[in-house]
Amino acid sequence: MSMVCRTSMVVLKTPQSHKLALRHILQQCSRLVASSAPLQAEGTYRGLELEIRNKKMGRPLSPFLSSYKMHFPMATSLMHRVTGTGYSSLYYLSVIGVVGLAPSFPALIESIQSLHLDPNLILATKFVLTWPVMYHMFNGLRHLAWDAGAGFDLPMVYKSGFFVLGLTTIVTLFLLSL
């Protein structure tokens, strides 16, 4: 197939009509593709039979998180992804909500204040909203250090992970005290 297609490409480089050359290429290549052997050899994969056999043997469909033992670096990586995805989604939803629901931002703040919420509930809500942002920021700095090649050995990964968790909590509590 490649010999015919390469030979046909030479035709395009000559000053002949490009339309005829293109037709020749398409005819030659389509004949070879149509007459070529199927991609699967006979009996190598029989989808339903293989699936039934794997179920009988208790094999999972494919490896997933349930196949692995959860360890600390895996949990911090998962939290980093969840906080990033969650906050990007929350950001867009809040913009849509502010634009669609309130005539202005001060009116939105006034409507929230008119609910007369318990100060402890407000403080807990601030913590729940602030902690993931701080975690994502500090863990992102940790990832940047890894990209630079620093702190990638396993003991340092654990130390930096605990440091990020502690620093996140301290900074979040500091921000709540303001």
Image: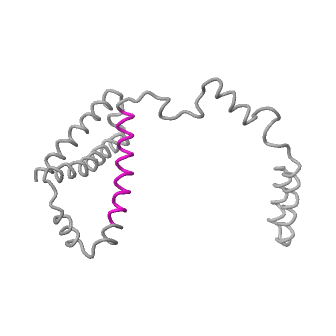
Q: What is the residue that sits farthest to the left in this orientation?
A: 178
> For the point 84% across and 51% down, which residue is it?
33
Q: Which region shows up in magenta?
A: 73-95
Residue at 34% in and 45% down? 144
Q: Residue 169, relative to residue 117: is it above or below?
A: above
Answer with left or right where residue 84 lies relative to residue 115.
Answer: right
Question: Residue 108 location, x and y as percent?
Answer: 23, 69
Q: In the displayed structure, does residue 44 sit left or right of residue 132?
A: right
Residue 147: image location, x then y, percent = 38, 42
Residue at (32, 26) in percent of width and height: 155
The residue located at (22%, 43%) in the rendering is 168
Residue 38 or residue 98, whichever sits in front: 98
Question: Is 40 on the left-hand or right-hand side of 133?
Answer: right
Residue 83: where, in percent of width, then height? Answer: 34, 48
Q: How is the image coloured?
A: one colour
Q: Count up the numbered dots.
A: 0
